[in-house]
Amino acid sequence: MATQHYHLDTNYLPSYLLCCCDKGDRKDHEAYKVINSIFYKGDVVVVSEFVFGELFHVLRRNYKKEVFHKLVDQLYSKDFFDDRLKVFRVEGDGLDRLASHVNEIRRADSRLQSNDVIITAFFLCDETSKWLLTFDNDLVSSKGLAQLLESRGKHIGPTPFPR
């Protein structure tokens, strides 16, 4: 079976990092288990360059200075991205596809926040990825977005595994 790619939303990665630092609540532990299950299966967890950039803002805004530094140190620890996570970039002609996906997502659900639209557009640009892992209720509950993703054989939600 081919290797699966799973994209992370910005709200998912801090949950994983918190558990790596022996912190976190129930939701954080759910994210940690899901990501470790993906690693165990030999699949790939992907973070778009947009999510990676937005992550620093989210960490700084939501966590105390000591926790912020610990989480950022975890990100920059030796081989964290090479061994555990891959950064997904869009370049060249892919930028036209990214813009096209932004427009499609806006048409599917104009109520979505701009950052969520861009994160989802990056996910659509990755042809090898089937899941966008997120805790964002606006994304998960959007019927228009769900229809668009299903038409592409893609899914969105907090876990790809049966509960």
Image (tube, grey):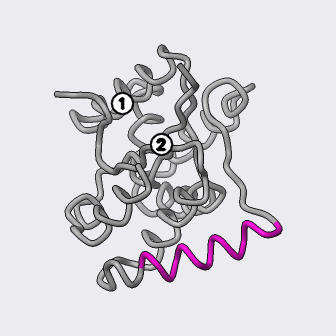
Disc ID at residue 23:
1
Q: Residue furthest front?
A: 151
Q: Quadrant of residue 84?
A: top right
Magenta highlight range: 92-105
Pick the front one: 20 or 81: 81
Disc 2 vs disc 1: Cβ atoms closer than 8 Å? yes
Residue at left offset 62%, top offset 78%: 99
Residue 112, percent across and down? 34, 77
Residue 94, percent across and down? 73, 66
Say which residue label 2 marks.
67
**Label 2 sits on what residue type?**
Val
**Quarter of the C terminus within the rendering:** top left
Residue 88, percent across and down? 67, 50
Pick the front one: 61 or 46: 46
In the picture, measured across the screen, residue 12 lies left or right of residue 56, that is left
Q: Residues within 10 Å of mark 1 (few under 14, many from 20)?
A: few
Mark with earlier residue (2, 1)? 1
Give the SS element for disc 2.
helix
